[in-house]
Amino acid sequence: MTWYVRLVSRVGRGQPFRARAGMAARKGTPVIRRVLAAVAALALAAGCGTDQAAAPAGKELILATTTSTQDSGLLDDLLPEFTRDTGWRVKSLAVGSGQAIELGRRGEADVLLVHSPEAEVRFVAEGSAGPRRLVMHNDFVLAGPAGDPAGTRNQPAVEAMRKIASTGAGFVSRGDESGTHAREKQLWHQAGVTPSGGWYRSTGQGMGATLRVASETSAYTLTDRATYLTQKPPLEVLNEGDKALLNIYHVIEMTRKAGDRVQPEGAKAFADWIVGAKAQGMIGAFGEGKLFVPDAGKDEAALGS
Amino acid sequence: MDVLGDGLVEAVRLLLTGDQDTWAITGLTLRVSLTATVIALLIGVPLGAVLALGRFRGRRVLLAIANTGMGLPPVVVGLFVTVLLWRSGPLGALGLLYTPTAMVIAQAGIATPIVVALTAAALHQVDPDFLLQMRGLGATRVRALGALLTEAKLPLLAVGMAGFGAVVSEVGAAQMVGGNLAGETRVLTTAAVLATSRGQFALAIAFGLVLLAIAFAVNLAVTFAQHRQTATR
């Protein structure tokens, strides 16, 4: 310590500096020490609350799924039961169906719960995915301003889309390669419309955010019914019930062909469980029975008829 | 505007009733962001000191890089760390993706350039003769640097606060490398985003207010420490 005191006394900035530095030398560095103590205390306090969450290791799988299953709260109901029944812990990533499939393709997820049937069929045909099974459905609805400026009520869904385009009434798209966006593009395709121009906006965000943009700008949008019902936006359901608006969820197991670290046994455990009687019952009862229809074992072609 | 009032009420209710989820989320937020800040300080302060005081070729370029790094978008850092930690990525074998550790890595990556650049700026403020004279008096390089850092401790505290503020409030990297998993990697920012996308605006605002409150508490503690130090002079 003496070198330091001797040193600072000769630095040549005069008395105040010497006194200050001398004090620091005698008492150590109080500020830093006090702050470190405070930070350590905070971090310690913070650590206490979360230890049990981080503790158990072992069987853990990654589920890539869609924002609608998370935003509606369905996963919060299902996943703890699955863990209790099978011992598998689940890391669920709520992303668009497009990203979920891409995560599966790269072997970054073990099992997928998605609603983009055409893309799923193409993906399964690539060969890295295992079995694909029907889980449940709900439906898409076309929501828009109560005045319905494009006259979409009681029209077939494709005709309603064509009318929105031809009148130039506003439409807000997810634009995020989600299952909802895929269905929207399919409807435009069937209507023979290439959506572009000032009336067509793309948010690149989830369903909740897109619904809000649509309601703030008094525009139409395509939404899954579950998100519509949980968000209660100031938009009305103008067009519903068309078979082209069915929103069908499948579970897809991934295999080691997608990546060395994929856990097919975890994938199978989840897929078997979610098409089983218990999970199907929970899906049917979820949200007072208004949000999802359990479909395990049914014929996909017969849905909605 | 109702939603703001509801949010305030909800925030107070969550904190006072000791809502377990909220406390766990708040605790994780503090744990991750404070750890990341400490790591960033350990790496960034020496680097910043070298950049401020060193005399070597390319120093200005490195300083410019550090200054640019202050504006590094969290999403870019998050994406980079995600790709590194993917099962198929170079560090995939560690199995760190979607864990708090991954979030600490990403946030430390965000805070380090800030710490480097601001440390360099803070040390520039110190009398340039100080180090020179100490070296002249025979202090070793490391000891002279230690004395210099002691001299600049108040600005360095501000550096720490800036780093902490940047990481505790970011959402892009936390979402990407953490995955916003309930009970595991959900922090206040990602919880607020999720509540918003679920249409629970009051809850989202409540999380935002809790975030503000802890940022305030941390800064208050540091400011008090600073103030007490100034008062003893």
Image (tube, rainbow, N blue to C red):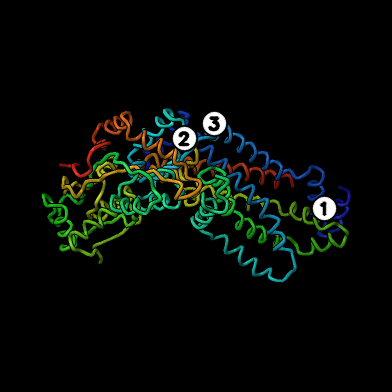
Tag 2 secondary structure = strand
Which of label 1 and label 3 is nearer to you?
Answer: 3
Q: Which is nearer the eye, A138 or A104? A: A104
**Occupied quadrant, residue A168:** bottom left
- Foreground disc of the pair 2, 1: 2
Residue tagged by mark 2?
A89
* In the image: residue A157, left or right of residue A208: left
Nearest to the observer: residue A41 or residue A185: A185
Which subunit holds the residue at mark 3? A
Image spot of residue A262 (x, y percent): 47, 45
Q: What residue is at 16 percent from the left and 47 percent from the top?
A: A242
Labels 1 and 3 touching (C-beta < 8 A) = no
SS assignment at label 3:
helix
Image position, residue A268 (x, y; %): 40, 38
Label 2 is placed on what type of residue? Answer: Arg
Q: Nearer the viewer, mark 3 or mark 2?
A: 2
Question: Which mark, by number, is residue A18?
Answer: 1
The answer as to whether the residues below labels 2 and 1 share one chain is yes
Residue B32 coordinates in the image, percent (x, y):
56, 43
